[in-house]
Image: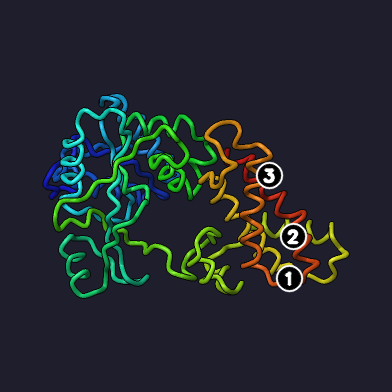
Amino acid sequence: MANTSHAPSRVLLGWSAATPRLREEAERRLAAARQRLPSLELCGHAACSQFEHYRSTCAEAMRGERADAFVVLSDDDDLWHSRRVESYAIALQRMSGTPEVSAVCCPVIAQPVRRGQRAVALQGEVDAMLSSGEAEVLSDCREYFCFCARLATVRQFFEQTCDAVVRSRYCDLRFANFCDGRVRPEAVTALVEPVAGCWMYFYSTRQFNGAEHKTLDPFDADERSAYASSEQAVVQLRTTSADEALSREFAARHQWLGAVDLGALATVVASLRMNAEVFAVQMRGAGWAWDERATSEAAQAVMCQLLNDCVEQVSDFSAAQLRSVREVLIPELAQEAAQIYT
């Protein structure tokens, strides 16, 4: 970032440390970073989620910037191309006089070809990976960091998003949808291209690749194919005590089901709950609206249908057990997610 060809006017960094020793080391490194990047402003906070950090830094930015200033976001373990900001700046200059545009999106990123490849810290290392075939450039990405949004748009997002969503690990999905106009019909987003030779952003976590993905998107034909068995679909899922407790309660309430593997049931509960959170946070489906109607019966019905699509892929229960999951468990989880995340 210190070597960028077009320096941003301000760089706000939200950060926290789990232990005093880690905090001391982080402060030392950040002090050194400020020597190379004078525009860096540190916004230290207690441990919180990624988008809680963004919310705090947005509030800080509002104190010293015009609402029509533009903002780009960054993850903590990714890498910027030195011409990333320049690419956005050129695009915005060309669109001067278009106040109706609330965000621009450059859908170009670089990413590793496979998971678990070596970590990189320099632009030249990414260029070398691209040359050797260890990395690739995508041109149709819609991740949250692809958007350069007006500060007023970012502020509006946090004003209209409940705390549970901001805390969610999937909050980035709603932010991307918010910037892209998929949940705001009035939003105007412009697609832009980077300058020649610029891959914009190196996303160190490879995007969906079969069983590496954590959740199932029933709208995606490729994911339907990849999740042909329950064994694939539960990869990387972690069951919690709440999942196990709900599984025991559910099995006790429906003893007519006969013997059921509580461990397998807890895995199904965890998978459905994770998918319910993803769907609720994204507000996916025609039943959702960007207001209080998001908790309506219509929205919950949409989520029930989405989860019913999921359970076909993640469950190998008998027909009677599956029917009970559909008729009782899925409506409960849909209602729970709608109440928490809207």
- Marks 2/3: CA distance? 14 Å
Residue 50 rendering spot, x and y as whole percentages: 41, 45
| Left or right: where 211 falls relative to 145 | right
Return the mark for residue 335: 3
Q: Quadrant of the C terminus?
A: top right
Horizontal side of 275 relative to 143 (left or right) equals right
Marks 1,3: beta carbons within 8 A: no
Work out how far the residue at label 2 is from the one at label 1, CA to CA, in angstroms: 9 Å
Residue found 45% across the figure and 35% down from its top: 184
Residue type marked 3: Gln
Instruction: Indicate the secondary structure of the residue bearing disc 3.
Output: helix
* Residue 119 figure quarter: bottom left
**Quick one: label 3, few (<14), some, or many (20+) residues within 10 Å?**
many
Looking at the image, is 68 positioned above or below residue 304? above
Name above or below for residue 28 compared with residue 113: above
Foreground of the two, 68 or 115: 68
Please name the residue shown 63% across and 47% down the image. 302
Classify 10 Å Cα crowding around label 1: few (below 14), some (14-19), many (20 and above).
some
Instruction: Name the amino acid, label 2.
Output: Val
Q: CA distance from mark 1 to mark 3?
A: 23 Å
- Identify the residue under disc 2: 325
For marks 1 and 3 on the same chain, the one whose residue lies earlier in the sequence: 1
Q: Which mark is residue 317?
A: 1
SS at mark 1 in the image: loop
Circles 2 and 1: CB distance less than 8 Å? yes
Query: Which residue corresponds to the image point at 78% horizontal and 60% vertical from the top-left?
Result: 324
